[in-house]
Image (cartoon, coloured by chain):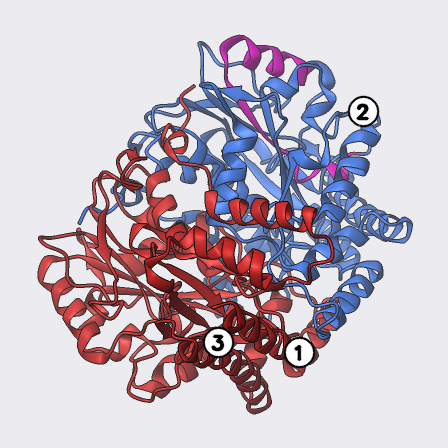
Chain colours: A red, B blue
């Protein structure tokens, strides 16, 4: 019996447990402290009424033999695939059809499971700082090499630093890579990529035969009209890109679970259609997303649902602006928060992330996320999010301003 | 760029597409034919009222900021893990605790994804006939070798024939294997394993260090009191077994999606706790089962829910008895259908599976599943299921009796 030794190479998932430990330590000594949590990456607004109505109706359907639905298509129901194709892609000039869209239970699942399609020898490029799941899933599959604890990086991954100097959008790697994870609007920095920047990535990938794994989970937060929402708005992307979509942050589905992966028919590597490989993977190792949830997701595309979703997004973006403008006025370097719920804040005088985290926790009673937890290039930053309540957010910003 | 070449070794998923092709061909020529489908492996009864009420309440909770739930625990909510531990395991004397249970979206997902924990060099044993997902997921992971089209088997898998001679429960393999898939009550044969038979498997696995992957998706159909519902009713299983549970066939969740995997704390291989490896896998590549669905599953364990589920199971089992007794009276060799919705029927005079399938389709207008589609040892059998309507089932049996 041989276990998958790659699992044993993974360092502990340090970031959020360490935050929890420090918060618990502080509140243990200061039980009277009224903490405000601006580190959270989870939504807090309830599901839109249109979604609730659709899910109630679907629950009722499941209660009658005439309308009961058993196993659905592994790829998702056509009603949802077609709505996504029309509104998320075709309406923006991105040529993606319903049969290139696969509905799933989450972008985290898809971002990890997509690795099943690729061999262990591929060279993988990730941003630094980065959403840890891209890294850990490749490490589990043997594509990351060994973890170097001193340098806090995997020996075989290609890291692409995202810093103030490059506006938090990575430069092309030196030499060829095979798989490239890009996430725009970015978690954790809140940065976006312009059409021109994405075009350079698409051209690079087509030149060297790489595949771009494009995480568009935050596209609904884009406010600037010239910023692409989908990699498939870029010419040439159909031969080099896979895109992940999610209802989590868009429509408040973090606890309801629905997402999608779009793979164009023209994306062929090693003589095989990646859409067909993914279809085979999903048909063999997945049995579809709950009917009730798919009906809820479909309601996001109704006129009513779209208006309600936009209200929630506007609420979170308003919080992000409160943070961004308040902390900029206090003299901190801020970015993100315009097309993203995330605000990326430079620490004062280059203070280490964790020191600034402690300072804000202890002196302002505000919980944040230290940027260093997302990778070495996150050192000197913290991440704040617009996902809290509006009053709490405003109060937290006032507290931070007071102590600076 | 290197794709996962193992995907390219997979033969087409032939069985259900070939059935669909033959049915479409027949109905094209005979549009007036009133087909009865007894080949289906999907439930048809609506969800129990207790489940519906719980899901409506959970949808309402998601509509209010005070009760809204975002990201849940990747392992599932304690309310459901605890209910399962109590009713599915501890009530039967199986020592499994809530923190050894991981809630998921489906047993098919878990049966496939569990392979992430194991290296590519392990030797895998499967029953013949077999639920194809066990085979295909191992083939995708490189553990099956090459597919031999003539012999209809993978070169590196260890096949364990389940035939009339061994009562459709496999003998121990010659020599050591590393991973053993067992499914009782069995799909497709409907056979069960006794306590003594399972004890032999547990002893074998503990002796050679193998891990038993026990699929208990059909345990709710067990009617004979001495038959174990869980591998963990067997002494010694905590050091050698993983069990898959599902609400699909139990409570009609095929389109609602909820399942669980139980991994005991004592299951250690290569120095690693498989429970911890699975926890890491799920935390990295999964984000939990929908809150609404978990509340629906919890309701299955209420007094009302249990009674309603039992009624549905009794309905399907009554259909299975109709099939079993009717076809036995017509002179066919039948097994299964007592502790299972599946009836495994020998063809008359050893007729090939597909020929008998065609005969029943064309002469009785009854759709079945040819046993040969589940593996070479399924040749000479067809699978019928109790998942249809009671009247249809009775009529189908009458039609079959008439043509024999």
Q: Are marks 3 and 2 on the same chain?
A: no
Output the chain of dot 2.
B
B334 horizontally vs A223: left or right: right
Q: Estimate how packed mark 2 is, as few (under 14), some (14 to 19) or many (20 or more) residues with alpha carbons within 10 Å.
A: some
Q: Residue at x 33, y 40 (%)?
A: A139
Looking at the picture, how far across and down is residue B94, in whole percent?
Answer: 76, 25
Judge whether residue B134 is colored magenta. Answer: no
- Local secondary structure at mark 2: loop
Report, in whole angstroms, how far the alpha carbon at label 3 lies from the one at label 2: 55 Å
N-terminal-most mark, 1 or 3: 1
- Which quarter of the rendering shows the N terminus of chain A? top left
Looking at the picture, how far across and down is residue A78, in whole percent?
Answer: 49, 73
Output the chain of dot 1.
A
For residue A342, which quarter of the picture?
bottom left
Q: Is residue A386 above or below residue B202?
A: below
Residue to which mark 2 is pinned: B93
Q: Estimate how packed mark 3 is, as few (under 14), some (14 to 19) or many (20 or more) residues with alpha carbons within 10 Å.
A: many
B337 horizontally vs A126: left or right: right
Per the rendering, the mark at residue A323 is 3
Q: Residue at x 44, y 78 (%)?
A: A220
Q: Which region is colored magenta?
A: B197-222
Labelled pair 1, 3 in contact (Cβ < 8 Å): no
Between A123 and A26, the residue placed more toward the observer is A26
Looking at the picture, how far across and down is residue A9, in whole percent?
Answer: 37, 31
């Amino acid at each position: 019996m041989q276990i998958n030794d790659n699992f044993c190479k993974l360092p502990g998932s340090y970031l959020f447990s360490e935050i929890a430990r420090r918060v618990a330590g502080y509140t243990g000594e200061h039980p009277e402290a009224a903490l405000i949590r601006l580190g959270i990456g989870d939504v807090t607004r309830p599901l839109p009424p249109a979604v609730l109505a659709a899910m109630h109706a679907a629950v009722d359907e499941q209660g009658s033999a005439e309308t009961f639905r058993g196993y659905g298509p592994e790829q998702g129901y056509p009603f949802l695939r077609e709505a996504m194709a029309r509104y998320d892609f075709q309406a923006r000039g991105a040529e993606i059809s319903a049969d290139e869209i696969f509905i799933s239970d989450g972008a985290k699942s898809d971002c990890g499971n997509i690795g099943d399609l690729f061999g262990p020898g591929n060279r993988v490029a990730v941003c630094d700082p980065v959403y840890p799941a891209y890294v850990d899933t490749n490490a589990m599959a043997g594509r990351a090499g060994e973890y170097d604890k001193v340098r806090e990086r995997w020996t075989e991954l290609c890291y692409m630093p995202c810093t103030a100097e490059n506006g938090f959008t990575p430069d092309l790697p030196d030499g060829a890579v095979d798989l490239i994870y890009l996430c725009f609007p970015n978690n954790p920095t809140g940065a976006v990529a312009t059409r021109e920047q994405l075009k350079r990535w698409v051209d690079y990938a087509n030149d060297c035969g790489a595949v771009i794994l494009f995480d568009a989970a935050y596209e609904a937060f884009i406010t600037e009209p010239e910023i692409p929402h989908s990699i498939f708005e870029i010419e040439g992307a159909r031969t080099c890109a896979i895109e992940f979509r999610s209802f989590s942050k868009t429509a408040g589905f973090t606890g309801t679970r629905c997402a999608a992966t779009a793979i164009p028919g023209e994306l062929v590597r090693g003589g095989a259609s990646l859409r067909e490989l993914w279809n085979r993977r999903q048909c063999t190792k997945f049995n579809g997303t709950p009917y009730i949830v798919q009906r809820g997701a479909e309601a996001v595309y109704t006129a009513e649902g779209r208006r309600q979703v936009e209200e929630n997004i506007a609420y979170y973006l308003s919080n992000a602006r409160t943070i961004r403008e308040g902390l900029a006025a206090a003299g901190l370097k801020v970015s993100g928060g315009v097309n993203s719920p995330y605000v990326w804040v430079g620490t004062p005088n280059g203070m280490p992330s964790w020191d600034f985290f402690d300072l804000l926790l202890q002196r302002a009673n505000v919980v944040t996320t230290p940027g260093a937890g997302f990778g070495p290039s996150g050192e000197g930053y913290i991440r704040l999010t617009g996902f809290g309540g509006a009053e709490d957010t405003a109060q937290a910003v006032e507290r931070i301003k007071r102590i600076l």
